[in-house]
């Protein structure tokens, strides 16, 4: 009597891979549609001349960004498709072999920075400076990821690209939407307050009717608006929005990808690495949006400053991812709350000194000595924060590597020691 062959074991559907595939398809579709729309817009005749095309200086960088988003979606789609068909992706590893490439990347970044600084003088095409902006932002972030992920056991390449896609096609949109709501509320409240001020009401009515507006008619308004800079309430609003609400929104949603895979029983190392990838992607796209709007003498300063911002986004999301994974293991939610509070305060401090440094460059007189002293100290404060964040990234990596790679057991001889009497 022969036994029938065993029934094939049906593997359960990998829903996470299906959702990752759906997100990737939506992301690449929207990116390509945006690319085609911008391309069509760039070839429309300008309304003022009827013959020349629209200003490509504003559209070309967006074309490169939408193209980059479409490229970022491709690996996630491929890995998710292979996983659905039971073809697991290889593990991601960052080992010593990446160190020579890191040295080359530093030299490349310096060369690109020199080219970008002289782009206006050399009259380089926007089609050259746009991809240059992508590289000038991406290279430091990739170096930071190399340091943060060095010799850590993270997971599969599919998971890595999944984190990147969630940050690019979900987190950025949610954060942008919420921040726009906050800014809209502040603008509406500020408009209502200005309307109630007798000295501003006539000028605001003039702006809304858009009649008989000249530079001479607006000059008194500008003079009176500068007095707002010496109102304590303005500083309170700036601190509330840019140093509290914005950090709370961004730090709450940057590790969104880590939350979505929380059920995978992440180790603290995996949570940290997933957070690093999420934050790095967020920082990359945010910095590219800003770099496309600067040129000339401010370009290099902005490019260097965005390295610190990229470090901030990468580190804080990594810490949040670590805290989330660790908390899911031991259920100590106070750790998660303290970590969130800490990264919000760090982010808020960074924004505070960045805003003060920006106000200082505008050279508008401010009568408060305390604020003037903070403005003078802001470059040093930002430098100190960069040093502390860089040290935290290195120390966190070293700590997790030590926990992931316990010391080897002592080797015992398999023969008896006959010298013992």
Image (cartoon, helix red, strand yellow):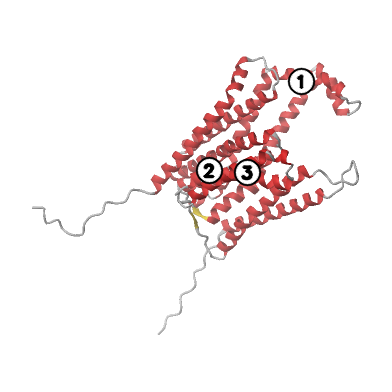
Q: Earlier in the sequence, mark 1 or mark 3?
A: 3
**237, 145: nearer the viewer:** 145
Q: Would residue 292 appear left or right of 251 to someone viewing this image?
A: right
Q: In whole angstroms, how far apart are the C-alphas of marks 1 and 2?
A: 42 Å
- In this view, the residue farthest toward the bottom is 1
- In this view, the residue farthest toward the front is 122
Mark seen at residue 225: 1
Can residue 311 be seen at all in this image of the molecule?
yes
Does the residue at mark 1 contact the one at mark 2 (Cβ under 8 Å)? Answer: no
**64, 164: nearer the viewer:** 64
Answer few, some or many: residues within 10 Å of disc 2's Cα (few below 14, many 20 plus, some between 14 and 19): many
Residue 323 position within the rendered picture, expressed as x and y whole percent measured from the top left: 48, 41
Residue at image location 50% in from the left, 33% down from the top: 387
Which residue is identified by label 3?
A: 112
- In this view, the residue farthest toward the left is 421
Residue at image location 52% in from the left, 47% down from the top: 102
Q: Would residue 139 appear left or right of 290 to someone viewing this image?
A: left
Answer few, some or many: residues within 10 Å of disc 3's Cα (few below 14, many 20 plus, some between 14 and 19): some
Q: Within the image, what quadrant is residue 3 found in?
A: bottom left
Q: Using the image, determine if residue 59 lies above or below residue 417.
A: above
Residue 354 position within the rendered picture, expressed as x and y whole percent measured from the top left: 62, 29
Q: Give SS at disc 3.
A: helix
Which residue is identified by label 2?
A: 144
Q: Give SS at disc 2.
A: helix
Q: In whole angstroms, how far apart are the C-alphas of marks 1 and 3?
A: 40 Å
């Amino acid at each position: 009597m022969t036994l029938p062959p065993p029934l094939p074991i049906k593997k359960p559907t990998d829903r996470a891979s299906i959702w990752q595939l759906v997100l990737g398809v939506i992301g690449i579709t929207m990116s390509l549609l945006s690319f085609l729309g911008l391309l069509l817009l760039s070839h429309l005749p300008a309304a003022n001349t009827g013959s020349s095309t629209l200003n490509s200086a504003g559209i070309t960088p967006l074309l490169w960004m939408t193209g980059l988003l479409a490229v970022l979606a491709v690996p996630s789609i491929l890995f998710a498709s292979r996983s659905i068909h039971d073809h697991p992706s290889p593990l991601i590893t960052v080992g010593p072999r990446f160190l020579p490439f890191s040295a080359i990347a530093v030299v490349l970044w310096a060369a690109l920075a020199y080219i970008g600084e002289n782009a206006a003088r050399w009259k380089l095409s926007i089609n050259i400076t746009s991809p240059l902006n992508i590289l000038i932002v991406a290279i430091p972030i990739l170096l930071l990821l190399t340091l943060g992920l060095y010799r850590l056991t993270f997971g599969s390449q599919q998971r890595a690209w999944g984190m990147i896609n969630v940050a690019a096609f979900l987190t950025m949109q949610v954060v942008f939407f919420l921040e726009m709501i906050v800014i809209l509320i502040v603008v509406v409240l500020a408009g209502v307050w200005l309307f109630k001020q007798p000295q501003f009401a006539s000028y605001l009515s003039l702006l809304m009717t858009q009649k008989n507006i000249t530079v001479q008619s607006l000059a008194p308004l500008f003079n009176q608006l500068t007095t707002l800079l010496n109102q304590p309430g303005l500083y309170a609003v700036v601190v509330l929005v840019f140093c509290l609400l914005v950090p709370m929104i961004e730090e709450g949603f940057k590790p969104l990808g880590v939350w979505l895979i929380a059920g995978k029983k992440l180790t603290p190392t995996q949570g940290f690495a997933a957070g690093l990838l999420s934050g790095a992607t967020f920082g990359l796209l945010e910095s590219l949006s800003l770099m496309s709007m600067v040129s000339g003498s401010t370009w290099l300063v902005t490019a260097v400053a965005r390295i610190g911002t990229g470090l901030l986004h990468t580190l804080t999301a990594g810490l949040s991812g670590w805290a989330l994974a660790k908390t899911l293991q031991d259920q100590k939610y106070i750790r998660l709350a303290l970590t969130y509070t800490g990264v919000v305060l760090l982010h808020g401090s960074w924004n505070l000194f960045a805003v003060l440094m920006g106000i200082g460059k505008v050279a508008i007189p401010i009568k408060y000595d305390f604020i003037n002293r903070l403005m003078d100290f802001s470059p040093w404060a930002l430098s100190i924060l960069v040093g502390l964040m860089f040290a935290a990234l290195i120390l966190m990596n070293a700590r997790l590597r030590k926990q992931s790679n316990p010391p080897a057991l002592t080797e015992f001889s398999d023969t008896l020691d006959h010298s013992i009497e």
